[in-house]
């Protein structure tokens, strides 16, 4: 299992996700451009002293990521997807892909991969989206649950 953040913008979110990845021994892929410097104090604060336990992999671009990982099995997560994340059948080598906080993943990615695009249902009226670190936590733990890891 891998977590992929495409162009993350908010340091505390990425720090919290890094902490989650440390706790679950999950590699974290950060796809540039990042909305912060990797040594940002807010990023480090949110990740606390867990950074040494995180397998962080930086990629210059989405294309660079695809070249480096050579045919990864990608699962895309967006509020604009049709299928609930609980309907996905997760596999050990999946890459869980999340977009930037303010834009989400490009619609063309979701349109090109509808069978691998998922959403987290939201029942509250007027709520535009969940916090990115919460969304990653929800999905990652469901994937680990299905795989019998938690």
Image (cartoon, grey):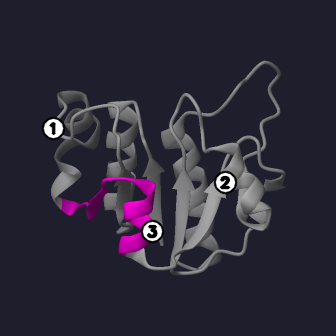
Find residue 66 and name its label: 3
Identify the image quadrant of residue 140.
bottom right
Comparing 64 with 125, the one in front is 64
Find residue 39 and name its label: 1
Q: Please state which of the two labelled residues, at mark 1 or mark 3, is closer to the viewer.
A: 3
The residue at which mark 2 appears reads as: 109
- Mark 3 lies on a secondary structure that is helix
Q: Position of residue 127 (x, y in %)?
A: 73, 23
Q: Position of residue 55 (x, y in %)?
A: 26, 65
Q: Are marks 3 and 2 in contact (CB under 8 Å)?
A: no
- Mark 2 lies on a secondary structure that is helix
Q: Please state which of the two labelled residues, at mark 1 or mark 2, is closer to the viewer.
A: 2
**Residue at coordinates 82% horizontally, 33% vertically from top-left?**
123
**Marks 1 and 2, how far apart at CA:** 30 Å
- Above or below for 55 versus 50: below
Q: Which residues are magenta?
A: 53-68
């Amino acid at each position: 299992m891998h977590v992929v953040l495409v162009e993350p913008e908010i340091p505390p979110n990425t720090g919290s996700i890094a902490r989650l990845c440390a706790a679950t021994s999950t590699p974290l892929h950060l796809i540039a451009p990042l909305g912060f410097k990797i040594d940002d104090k807010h990023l480090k604060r949110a990740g606390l002293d867990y950074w040494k336990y995180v397998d962080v992999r930086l990629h210059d671009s989405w294309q660079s990521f695809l070249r480096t990982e050579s045919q990864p099995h990608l699962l895309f997560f967006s509020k604009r997807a049709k299928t609930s994340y609980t309907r996905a059948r997760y596999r050990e080598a999946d890459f869980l892909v999340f977009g930037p906080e303010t834009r989400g993943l490009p619609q063309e990615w979701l349109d090109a991969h509808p069978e691998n695009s998922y959403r987290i249902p939201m029942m509250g009226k007027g709520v535009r989206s969940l916090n990115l670190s919460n969304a990653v936590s929800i999905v990652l733990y469901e994937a680990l649950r299905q795989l019998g890891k938690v």
